[in-house]
Image (spheres, helix red, strand yellow):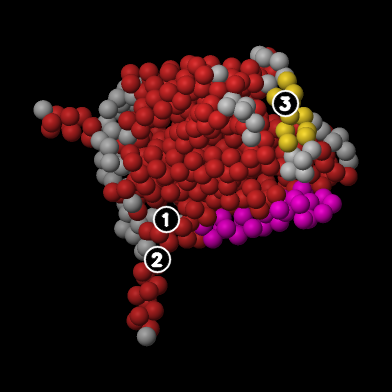
């Protein structure tokens, strides 16, 4: 009996699902809720007495510090995943609890700058550090456990990050509806405890394979920059720029998604479409990365993402889908297809970057190099939303459209069809630039070159 128990214990301790996949999902499904910001941003603004625009910077700071902490703490993750995953759990949960406290303070002191700055610090900086370290911690471990299906493994975890919004949004909305007065800060305090438990469990379970040792190669002992310089520097610059542009374009469209959906006459289905687009986001993370496992060169996936994005953006541009979609079934479907394709490509760009980097630069410094590359996410967090907002505010004229409510009454919605349509002109140019970069700057991997020679 004792021997059987010992065997079972050893089994789960050396099982790739218990030691890599499940902890990765626990970590990523927690930190991925950062994308639920739109669910409660207006409630925060109203409760503390500031405009929504003022509070929106908390989300931008969170994404910025996610990228920056990943870039600067990548070496910590490389050396000790247990330390980094614990840092992630503590920072994310304490940042969330701190956000709840400053929302409470802002409710008692309407218009207090201390409350607003406290939210920036807690949601933006402290949670941002938790996001960056939590995002990186399981990635290399997954690739070590799933050596033959690296894309599938990283896609699974990163899909958890993308699916977190779809899972948590209805829960958060229900909490806001049922917690009564001050429900917004109570929600943050409750979820801080829940997510700490989830992330701490992930921290305890996360483990590299038994017997894993860093390979003895010329990479060992080299600095991260030395490894990057082992290939033409333009190769890494190309990967960084592809990643940055894909995120910027994704955020530009996703940030306007709610208003675009209202613009084409589907105001009553905004919540459903938001959930479906989140599913496409998560599906793209898993599907594109698993597909890349079958390819000789993972950069092919990025080429496909950019081509699909260009084609659907171009179709909606040429048909004026956003401006003319209200009441036109075909144009409405085309706009929805664009939203879903961009969401899938946005997610796929995230899940493929660590495996693409490992194919080019090896596994020895992958956490550090991946962390540096995530700085593109941080910069895009400050440029994607803002670029789209600037275009919408400076092009076109807001108009009012009718929306029928379930009770039979009609409400008027203010939208800017020309502004949303103009955003597409910017994103298609950027997608074309990204496609050119993927074709010109990012070189084929050694594996791809060997396969090409073998065919000859």
Q: Is residue 136 above or below residue 194?
A: above
Q: CA distance from mark 2 to mark 3?
A: 59 Å
Q: Is residue 367 above or below residue 97?
A: above
Depth order, front residue of 65/420: 420
What is the magenta segment's predominant secondary structure? helix
Residue 285 x %, y %: 44, 41
Q: Which residues make up the magenta segment?
A: 174-203
Q: Which mark is residue 13?
A: 2
Q: Is residue 328 visible?
A: yes
**Residue 283 is one of the magenta-drawn residues:** no
Q: Is residue 419 above or below residue 69?
A: above
Q: In the rendered view, does 81 fall on the left or right side of 236? A: right
- What is the secondary structure assignment of the residue under circle 2? helix
Taking the spot 33% from the left edge, 18% from the top edge, the residue there is 440
Name the residue that disc number 1 marks: 20
On-image quarter of the C terminus: top left
Query: Which residue extends farthest right?
Result: 109
Q: Is residue 258 visible?
A: no
Q: In the rendered view, does 143 fall on the left or right side of 82? A: left
Q: Are marks 1 and 3 in contact (CB under 8 Å)?
A: no
Q: Which mark is residue 401?
A: 3
Q: CA distance from mark 1 to mark 2?
A: 10 Å
Nearer to us of marks 2 and 3 is: 3
Q: CA distance from mark 1 to mark 3?
A: 50 Å
Taking the spot 81% from the left edge, 33% from the top edge, the residue there is 50
Depth order, front residue of 278/70: 278
Q: In the rendered view, does 323 fall on the left or right side of 22? A: right
Residue 404 x %, y %: 73, 36
On-image quarter of the N terminus: bottom left
**Residue 184 is one of the magenta-drawn residues:** yes
């Amino acid at each position: 009996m004792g021997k059987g128990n010992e065997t079972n214990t050893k089994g789960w301790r050396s099982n790739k699902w218990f030691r890599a996949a499940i902890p990765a999902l626990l970590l990523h499904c927690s930190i991925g809720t950062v994308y639920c910001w739109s669910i409660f941003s207006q409630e925060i603004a109203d409760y503390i007495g500031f405009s929504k625009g003022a509070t929106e910077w908390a989300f931008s700071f969170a994404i910025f510090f996610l990228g920056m902490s990943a870039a600067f703490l990548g070496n910590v993750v490389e050396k000790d995943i247990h330390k980094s995953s614990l840092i992630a759990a503590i920072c994310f949960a304490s940042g969330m609890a701190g956000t709840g406290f400053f929302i409470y303070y802002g409710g008692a002191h309407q218009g207090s700058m201390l409350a607003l700055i406290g939210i920036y610090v807690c949601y933006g900086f402290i949670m941002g550090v938790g996001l960056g370290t939590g995002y990186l911690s399981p990635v290399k471990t997954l690739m070590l456990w799933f050596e033959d299906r690296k894309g599938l493994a990283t896609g699974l975890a990163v899909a958890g990050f993308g699916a977190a919004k779809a899972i948590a949004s209805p829960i958060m909305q229900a909490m806001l509806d049922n917690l009564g007065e001050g429900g917004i800060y109570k929600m943050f305090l409750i979820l801080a405890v829940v997510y700490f438990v989830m992330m701490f469990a992930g921290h305890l379970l996360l483990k590299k394979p038994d017997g894993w040792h860093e390979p003895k190669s010329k990479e060992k002992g080299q600095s991260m920059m030395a490894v990057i310089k082992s290939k033409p520097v333009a190769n890494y610059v190309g990967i960084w720029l592809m990643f940055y542009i894909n995120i910027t374009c994704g955020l530009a469209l996703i940030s306007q998604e709610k208003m675009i959906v209202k613009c084409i006459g589907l105001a009553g289905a905004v919540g459903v479409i938001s959930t479906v687009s989140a599913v496409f986001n998560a599906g793209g993370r898993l599907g594109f990365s698993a597909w890349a496992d079958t390819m000789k060169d993972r950069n092919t996936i990025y080429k496909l993402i950019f081509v699909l994005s260009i084609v659907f953006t171009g179709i909606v541009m040429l048909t004026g889908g956003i401006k003319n979609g209200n009441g036109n079934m075909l144009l409405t479907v085309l706009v929805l297809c664009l939203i879903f394709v961009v969401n899938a490509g946005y997610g796929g760009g995230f899940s493929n970057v660590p495996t693409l980097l490992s194919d080019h630069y090896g596994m020895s410094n992958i956490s550090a190099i991946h962390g540096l590359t995530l700085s593109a996410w941080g910069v895009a967090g400050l440029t994607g939303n803002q670029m789209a907002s600037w275009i919408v505010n400076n092009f076109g004229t807001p108009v009012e459209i009718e929306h029928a409510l379930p009770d039979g009454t009609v409400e008027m919605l203010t939208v800017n069809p020309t502004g949303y349509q103009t955003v597409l002109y910017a994103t298609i140019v950027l997608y074309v630039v990204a496609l050119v970069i993927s074709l010109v700057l990012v070189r084929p991997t050694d594996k791809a070159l060997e396969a090409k020679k073998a065919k000859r």
